[in-house]
Amino acid sequence: MTTPSDQPQRPGPPDVQGTIDEFRANGGRVGGRFEGTSLLLLHHVGAKSGIERVNPLMYVAVGTGYAVFASKGGSDTNPGWYHNMQANPEATVEVGTETRSVRAREAEGDEYDRLWVEGLKVMPMMSQLVANSARSALPIVVLERR
């Protein structure tokens, strides 16, 4: 399968690449820890490197877009994709068998509160990730279709 952009891609770690391969082979569905979740592949450009990267992320539908949560597995720091999206908000997502252009923005205020509650319904482990880290909250990025 070709990638949505002409930029070179940097392969992810084997477990991430395996999830990406499984997603593409099964029309957006995967097993294991992501089984039964809404999953997308976020194509983003490295803020420093300019290299396209791909991350599988669980999401919550927001109108015609998606909300993704910058958890980094409960780390005390935000994931690289979050920093990349701040620097380069134009991106592409694969959802199911479709590829869509999106623009990222950070959720704030009432929208953040609403999306956090929605996110906890489908990903209840997020509250534990925050509790186990030095962060007081996880950033929520809204990917709006262009």
Image (cartoon, helix red, strand yellow):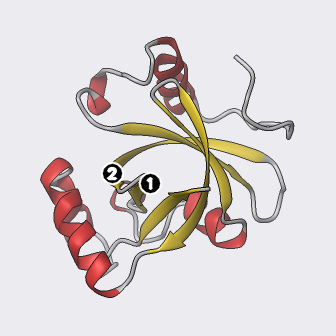
On the picture, is 25 further left or further right than 8? left
Q: Is residue 98 above or below residue 120?
A: above
Instruction: Give the image location of residue 121, x and y in percent.
Output: 13, 54
Disc 1/disc 2 C-alpha distance (Å): 6 Å
Asked whether the residues under the numbered discs 1 and 2 touch, taking CB atoms below 8 Å apart as contact, a structural biologist would say yes
Name the image quarter holding the C terminus.
Answer: bottom right
Which numbered disc covers residue 65?
1
Residue carrying label 2 = 61
Instruction: Give the image location of residue 137, x and y in percent.
Output: 31, 77
Picture quadrant where residue 124 is located: bottom left
Amino acid marked by disc 1: Gly
On the picture, is 27 further left or further right than 37? right
Residue at left offset 45%, top offset 64%: 142
On the picture, is 100 further left or further right than 126? right
Q: Is residue 115 above or below residue 61?
A: below
Q: Residue furthest bottom?
A: 109
Task: Identify the secondary structure beneath mark 2.
Answer: strand
| Crowd class of label 2 (few under 14; some 14 to 19; many from 20; radius 10 Å) | some
Q: In this view, does 93 lie above or below 145?
A: above
Amino acid marked by disc 2: Ala
Which numbered disc covers residue 39?
none
Q: How many labels does the image show?
A: 2
Residue at left offset 38%, top offset 60%: 71
Task: Identify the secondary structure beneath mark 1.
Answer: strand
Instruction: Give the image location of residue 1, x and y in percent.
Output: 69, 16
Return the residue nearer the eye: 140 or 11: 140
Residue at left offset 47%, top offset 70%: 77
Residue 120, visible in the rendered structure? yes
